[in-house]
């Protein structure tokens, strides 16, 4: 999707991909197959690039510094990116900035986690500081008897994402107060090296099994005043951390309306996929513009309501067969399929709908995504 945005900008993209079959490698011409934790392979790849950016946050910090030493711009830079890589670093920094945090503590061992739970009350959430994704590396701990589990998981070998090994050195367990949230929100902003920044409308995000299932933009029932506060918060975090490119601030909203920061992502984010079809400038284009130090584009909505629903792998391996029905039924439906092998539960695409009536827009998105997933009654 970043490649798609690069075409109109006339930018030549060189891709470092884990394998020849990954989605981006199917569409980018200049592909190097290599592992981003392989120092030499990554340095060789970066040589000759003007700018390096990412679609995930797992490239080791030390390697990013080495790429900078080659004279290649790394955007976002390693000092900013560490806040998206390491939840312990992020929590401490949010506390320093006075951004809303849940109660938290970095725990050395089971006893420290138990002491935290006894102090603030069970249940608590335990997270690995590094290497978690899509809900993996997050545990709800109901009491002392479960407190060993996250530490056992830490002791295991490094985990992998789509074939790439994640650097987990220095990984610790962060304990957090269990936030009994009513819903999750996402505040997406983009910042350029010169410090220009734009804020997208706030999205409500629906997570299922730790995976983003749907986003609704703008978030329903959010006052203009609070939406603006959350945009300001995300812009302030982007500025203080020196982020270049996209920053997604994932938020949890309590029943009383107050919010806390859940985590930060510094890349085009699933909660911003709606912007390809629903915003005047997509998150992918703005991320690239920021990486290239070009003026940023208008993040405003193209329609009053935009819903994005992810397509997860189901029983039907051929997704394109469903297009006949989906497009015939809804002429304003936008479909994005990623060219991935369909495996149960895997994100293989998304659909976006937009319009004037939120109920209608939501139903259309859910029906199309459901149909693509093999459920004609969705
Ligand atoms: P990941 O890095 O895997 O995305 P997150 O930190 O976003 O992990 O956590 C995954 C999900 O777990 C969140 O989307 C949220 O639903 C839930 N969660 C995370 N932290 C808390 C918390 N402190 N209290 C309650 N639920 C939480």
Image (cartoon, rainbow, N blue to C red):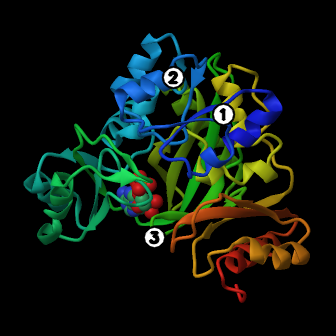
| Residue denoted by label 3 | 209
For mark 3, give the secondary structure.
loop
Task: Describe residue 87's horizontal placement relative to residue 9 as left or right.
Answer: left
Asked if residue 221 can be seen in this view, the reply is no
Distance CA(mark 3)–CA(mark 1): 28 Å
Question: In terms of image quadrants, where is residue 304?
Answer: bottom right
Query: Mark 3 or mark 1: which comes first in sequence?
Result: 3
Q: Are marks 2 and 3 in contact (CB under 8 Å)?
A: no
Task: Describe residue 271's horizontal placement relative to residue 359 as left or right.
Answer: left
Which numbered disc, 2 or 3, marks the residue closer to the eye? 2
Query: Mark 1 or mark 2: which comes first in sequence?
Result: 2
In the rendered image, residue 341, in percent from the top left (x then y), is placed at: 57, 65
Distance CA(mark 1)–CA(mark 2): 19 Å
Residue at horizontal 66%, vertical 82%?
Answer: 374
| Residue denoted by label 2 | 46
For mark 1, give the secondary structure.
helix
| Residue denoted by label 1 | 287
In the rendered image, residue 120, in percent from the top left (x then y), is placed at: 23, 58
Mark 1 crowd level (few <14, some 14–19, many ≥20, 10 Å Cα) = many
Front-most of 48 and 310?
Answer: 48
Instruction: Look at the picture and state if 254 lies above or below 224.
Output: below
Residue at horizontal 16%, vertical 56%?
Answer: 151
Quadrant occupied by the C terminus: bottom right
């Amino acid at each position: 999707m970043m490649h798609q945005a690069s075409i109109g900008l006339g930018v030549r993209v060189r891709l470092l991909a884990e394998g020849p079959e990954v989605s981006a490698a199917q569409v980018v011409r200049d592909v190097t197959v290599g592992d981003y934790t392989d120092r030499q392979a990554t340095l060789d790849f970066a040589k000759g690039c003007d700018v390096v950016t990412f679609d995930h946050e797992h490239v080791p910090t030390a390697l990013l510094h080495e790429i900078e030493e080659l004279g290649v711009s790394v955007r976002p830079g390693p000092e900013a990116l560490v806040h998206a890589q390491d939840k312990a670093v992020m929590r401490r920094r949010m506390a320093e900035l006075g951004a809303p945090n849940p109660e938290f503590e970095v725990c050395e061992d089971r006893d420290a986690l138990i002491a935290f739970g006894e102090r603030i009350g069970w249940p608590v959430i335990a997270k690995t500081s590094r290497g978690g994704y899509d809900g993996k590396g997050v545990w709800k701990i109901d009491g002392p008897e479960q407190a060993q589990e996250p530490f056992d998981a830490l002791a295991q070998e490094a985990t992998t994402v789509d074939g790439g090994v994640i650097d987990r050195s220095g990984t610790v367990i962060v304990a957090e107060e269990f936030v009994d949230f009513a819903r999750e929100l996402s505040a997406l902003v983009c910042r350029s090296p010169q410090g220009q920044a734009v804020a997208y409308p706030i999205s409500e995000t629906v997570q299922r099994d730790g995976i983003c299932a749907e986003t609704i933009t703008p978030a329903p029932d959010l006052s203009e005043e609070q939406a603006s506060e959350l945009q300001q918060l995300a812009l302030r975090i982007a500025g203080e951390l020196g982020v270049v490119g996209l920053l997604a601030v994932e938020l949890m909203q309590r029943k009383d309306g107050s919010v806390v920061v859940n985590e930060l992502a510094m890349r085009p984010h699933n909660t911003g996929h709606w912007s390809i079809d629903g915003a005047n400038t997509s998150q992918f284009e703005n991320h690239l513009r920021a990486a290239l130090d070009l003026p940023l584009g208008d993040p405003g909505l193209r329609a009053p309501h935009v819903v994005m629903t992810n397509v997860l792998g189901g029983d039907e391996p051929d997704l394109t067969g469903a297009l006949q029905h989906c497009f015939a039924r809804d002429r304003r439906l936008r479909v994005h399929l990623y060219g991935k092998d369909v495996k149960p539960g895997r994100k293989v695409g998304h659909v976006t709908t937009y319009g004037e009536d939120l109920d209608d827009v939501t139903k259309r998105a859910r029906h199309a995504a459901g149909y693509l997933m093999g459920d004609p009654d969705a």
